[in-house]
């Protein structure tokens, strides 16, 4: 069976960030999504401006604005996602990100660096997944987590 690259299809995974608050992490995620062919969705408010020099230094020329969508609130985001699968990556999940069957058009949601997502968001998603880590460690860097889970989605859906 021939592998399909992400350039051969308009169906792409979507990475969603819930109210991101560290500009360098968001910029790194913009670059990751650009290089791997994923869409980026940002649920506002953000904890920084996109004119922030820390953001610009990391994002460089990878800002594909036609592949980034902004939502004014989580309500708008979930209203528009009624017919799509939203998967939350959280340290509070039981199931590993590798024990899940991804679809090419999944939306993979990540919380704020400082606080994750509120409890009510956990109730709105279709699935919750975690990245297993060694004991007594809190969490990985957000941009690292995005790269890990996005790569697994792309591997399973034959997009890389």
Image (cartoon, rainbow, N blue to C red):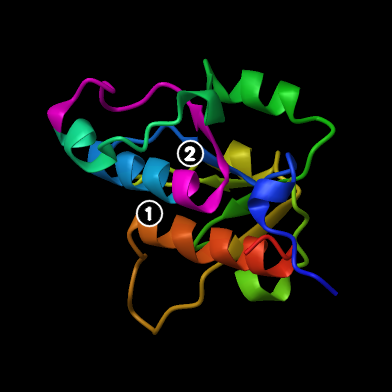
Q: Secondary structure at mark 2?
A: strand
Q: Is residue 112 above or below residue 93?
A: above
- Which image quadrant for residue 56? top left
Q: Position of residue 139 (x, y in %)?
A: 36, 65
Q: Secondary structure at mark 1?
A: helix
* x 48%, y 38%: residue: 17
Residue 25 badge: none
* x 56%, y 47%: residue: 37
- Residue 22 shows in the view: no
Quick one: which residue is furthest to the bottom in this view? 134
Q: Distance from label 1 to label 2 (Cα)?
A: 10 Å
Residue 17 badge: 2
Of the image marks 1 and 2, the number of the one nearer the N terminus: 2
Position of the N terminus, as image quadrant, is: bottom right
Looking at the picture, tell me which residue is in the foreground, 46 or 9: 9
Q: Position of residue 36 (x, y in %)?
A: 52, 53
Q: CB of mark 1 within 8 Å of CB of mark 2?
A: yes
Q: Position of residue 47 (x, y in %)?
A: 29, 27
Looking at the picture, tell me which residue is in the foreground, 113 or 9: 9
Q: Give, as a single range, the part of the protein colored magenta.
A: 33-53
- Which image quadrant for residue 92? bottom right
Q: Position of residue 134 (x, y in %)?
A: 39, 84
Q: Is residue 53 left or right of residue 76?
A: left
* x 36%, y 26%: residue: 46
Position of the C terminus, as image quadrant, is: bottom right
- In the image, residue 49 lies in the stretch drawn in magenta: yes
Residue assigned mark 1: 142
Quick one: which residue is furthest to the left in this view? 53
- Residue 138 shows in the view: yes
């Amino acid at each position: 069976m021939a592998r399909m690259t992400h350039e051969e299809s308009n169906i792409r995974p979507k990475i969603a960030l819930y109210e991101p608050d560290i500009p360098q992490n968001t910029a790194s995620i913009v670059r990751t999504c650009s290089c791997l062919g994923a869409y980026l969705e940002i649920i506002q408010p953000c904890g920084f401006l996109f004119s922030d020099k820390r953001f610009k230094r990391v994002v460089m020329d990878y800002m594909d604005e036609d592949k980034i969508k902004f939502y004014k609130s989580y309500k708008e985001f979930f209203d528009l996602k009624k017919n799509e699968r939203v998967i939350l990556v959280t340290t509070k999940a039981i199931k590993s990100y590798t024990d899940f069957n991804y679809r090419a058009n999944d939306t993979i949601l990540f919380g704020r660096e400082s606080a994750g997502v509120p409890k009510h968001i956990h109730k709105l998603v279709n699935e919750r997944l975690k990245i297993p880590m060694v004991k007594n460690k809190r969490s990985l860097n957000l941009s690292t987590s995005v790269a890990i889970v996005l790569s697994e989605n792309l591997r399973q859906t034959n997009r890389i």
